Amino acid sequence: MKIKRILAFMMAVMTAFALASCTKDPSETTASSGGAETTETATGTDAPETTGTAPIGSGEQTTASGTSETTSSSGGGEVPSPDAGLDIEYMQIGDYVTLVYNAATCEVEYEVERGLGSRQTVTLMAKMKDGFLFDGWSQGDALANATAAKPVNAVSKALTYSFEASYETTIYLNTSMTLVYDLNGGALSSGASDREAFSLVFYHNPSTRIEDGSFCRDGYTLVGYNTKPDGTGEDVSLGGRAQADGAPTLTLYCMWEQNTPESDFAYEVSGNTVTITGYTGTAQTVVIPESIGGHTVKKIAKGAFSNGTMKKAVIAKTVSLVEEGAFDGCAGLETVVLYDGALRTAGSTYGICEESFSGCSRLANIRINTVYTLTDTWQSYTATSLDRLIWAADKKKLIIIGGSGAHYGFDCGILDEALGGEYEIINFGENANITSLLYFDLAEDFIQQGDIVLWAPEPGGYTLGSASCGYRFWDFRKSDYDFLKYIDISLYSDLLSTFSDYCASLPLSRFKSFDAMTLSTNKYGDDVSARYWNGQRFSYSGSFSARPSAGEALSALVSKITEKGGSVYFSFAAMQRSGMESVSESEMLAYEQSLTSIPGIISISDYQDCIYDDELFYDSAWHMVNEGAKERTEQVAADLLIQLAKEGK
């Protein structure tokens, strides 16, 4: 097996070197903090785009202070062709500087003048593309990540920025696009604006404004946005991620639904709250208002809408409980619109669950609007992966599916380079307590001919595909509920009940902007924080007895992917050597066979090639240190190249 691993790795390296001469170097550089003295050489947004006497180009020029190296770059290398992808770039400049910027929004030229000792004078010049906004240069972090506790200030507001560097530092070129909201019959509340900027330092597509009361219309409920005023364009939930298609400005139209008349409801009042107990209307759309008779609507009782004829139901953001059977037998109900935060559990009772809509056989669309703008570390890297998937919809792509072992176990810059930059790589490794059905479901919606899904799961009920969403499902979705429009909700047994649990956990603090992102995650979705072995050893005994529990659903998704021309490859998760001593070869082969028995799934790895030295793991049986992720990725890259060669790709 060792010989096989060495030969495979040599093949990958040789292929990568052969391709390197005709492709850009897309290797990822970990963003680091730190500082350097800064000196602006130009001020104002109309500053010249070049400085110094040396022409912008390649070559060296001797100066009184030492050697001046001047280099021109756009998008991390030569000027990109229209189909080059225009990605988030991590450009190395001189010996010390990493520049992070979005190549879709601007072009960058730079100049490095080598001075005495270790000092280098770096000059950065930004040329904005039409319509995009220049927000300034910042050091150590992006302006979008600023908080009251950790402010980030622009070190220069000029298009040309010059500074001295003598140790590693990361510079961010902050750019934005503009979201314009057409009120479409509504009005602005006091102090609100109908436009806002969304930072594109980390993302390709913007998140929209949440339900914060900015837009109002008497007698109506704001249920979402649309790219067309009549609602025939792309639907976007409040706080959802809209597909910008590379445009510097996106206009979104408010979508309003008229509140159902109070006279159509039977209800009870207790204190200052209303419980809806019945409905006598016949409208195709039922919009439950936030108040009836001056009292707040809080509950919908069992049987309140039984056997109703509506096709769409909008449940007010004030409602905290939709009892089991509330919409029982509404055979024509197709769409339900909800809001996060209010649907909280009351003791052992779910605020909302599948049984709330028992007998609603046509219910296929759940739309959730954001009231709470909550993102944490893992939510922001989740947002990165979905944003990248949307952006790569018409590009050739490789989608990694796994738990946190994939998040910590891949260095996708190595994959990118080994595959010659041919694929846009998206790492959907998130958490072992989320069903992999979700990721296959999302991938299937975006797959096209030649795409690859690489499945590298830790063995477990959720990671191998379960109808249950898992207790962290919604924690990782809170950055963008619009993922729901890409999935088949009928595949999941507890989508709404887990949402109710999640709503109960939402605090009223820890707010963070949707355009922020943790610096411990790169553009692919890999973890790039510094990770070290803490001496732990783990046992895998019994782990590989796990089997897919929703085999039919998983099989159906894999079939859809392969029918569209995509490939689904399986590779074992990385495993710690000492922990595998109690696991037999027959166990591993039986585990592998159970997964590859699903038509369309092809195993590309030998399990023994996925066993690594103990010190390449740090705080989990599946979490690798940085060096481990590199070694593992090199092996997987070799396996992929061998498989693609077998298939003549």
Image (cartoon, rainbow, N blue to C red):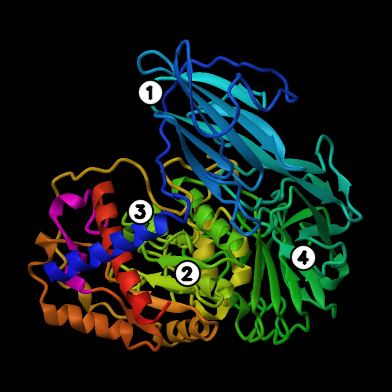
Q: Name the residue under label 4.
A: 288
Tell me the quarter of the image containing the N terminus.
Answer: bottom left
x 62%, y 44%: residue: 200
Counting other residues with Cα less than 10 Å from the Cα at mark 3, is it few (<14), some (14-19), or many (20 or more)?
many
**Hey, what amino acid is under mark 4?**
Ile
**Hey, what amino acid is under mark 1?**
Tyr
Please state which of residues 576 and 649 is positioned toward the viewer in this rendering.
649
Q: How far apart are marks 4 and 1 (CA)?
A: 60 Å
Residue extending farthest to the top is 64
Of callouts 2 and 1, the N-terminal one: 1
Q: Distance between the residues labelled 1 and 3?
A: 24 Å
Given contact means CB atoms under 8 Å apart, are the residues at marks 2 and 1 in contact?
Answer: no
Q: Name the residue under label 2.
A: 439
- The quadrant in which residue 202 appears is top right
Q: Name the residue under label 3.
A: 411
Of callouts 4 and 2, the N-terminal one: 4
**Residue 491 bears which disc, if any?**
none
- Horizontal and vertical percent position of residue 634: 28, 59
